[in-house]
Image (spheres, rainbow, N blue to C red):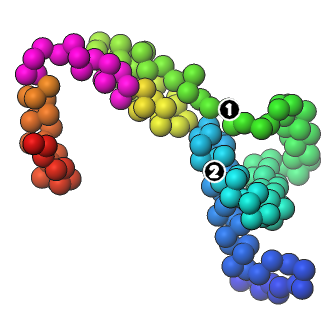
Amino acid sequence: MVVTRELADELPMEQVTEAKARAATLLLAFRHGNQLAFDHELELLLAENAEGEVTTLLAWIAAEAVRKAYAPQVADRVLRALARRAPENTSEVDTEEELVGVAELLEAVDAGDVATVRALVAATPDTTFLLGGLLQAVAMMLPFLPEGELTEIVTELRHRHGARTGIPRQG
């Protein structure tokens, strides 16, 4: 067990823990292209003037990741390469929405191509956009269902899942 003592100019342990959690939230939002979550967390940090602490912790997380993944003689080269490849404009998170092939997913499901479905889902780092696109596609198809078929589908879904989830019945 490593015992540390708090220095006068250091953050108290509770604040360090909170800053680590916020840094992790920011990193996860950035990694998964979640622009709304990233912007929200960033606004909170700026409003509280906590960006210095979180920036320090983000740097620490990055340094630890590089230290654990690469040999000491390689780590600095990796960091330099990352710095060279950094985009000029970092004001926005790159979303992966454009990379998600919802149409390809629908075609694979229709063809019964399980391997392609699995590959598409596995290749999507954040499935939020994939599921959102799938939901949009289903909504676009609903008007083309024959009359009464939607009611049958909803009844079947309620029969299968209603008892477990407590979905309220409409009208």
Q: Give the extent of the magenta segment.
A: 135-149
- Give the left or right position of residue 7, taking residue 31 as reference: right
Give the image location of residue 13, x and y in percent.
Answer: 73, 80
Q: Which quarter shows the N terminus?
A: bottom right
Answer whether labels 1 and 2 touch (C-beta < 8 Å).
no
Residue 60 position by quadrant: bottom right
Name of the residue lying farthest toward the front: 171
Amino acid type shown at disc 1: Asp
Q: Which class describes the residues within 10 Å of circle 2: few (<14), some (14-19), or many (20+)? A: few
- The Cα–Cα distance between marks 1 and 2, rounded to whole angstroms, is 15 Å
Give the image location of residue 11, x and y in percent.
Answer: 80, 77
Residue under label 2, please give it: 40
From this viewpoint, is residue 112 visible? Answer: no
Residue at x 43%, y 21% (from the top left corner): 102
**Looking at the image, residue 157 lies above or below residue 68:** above
Magenta segment main secondary structure: helix
Q: How many marks?
A: 2
Give the image location of residue 106, x and y in percent.
Answer: 35, 18
Residue at x 77%, y 38% (from the top left corner): 91
**Looking at the image, residue 13 lies above or below residue 76:** below
Amino acid type shown at disc 2: His
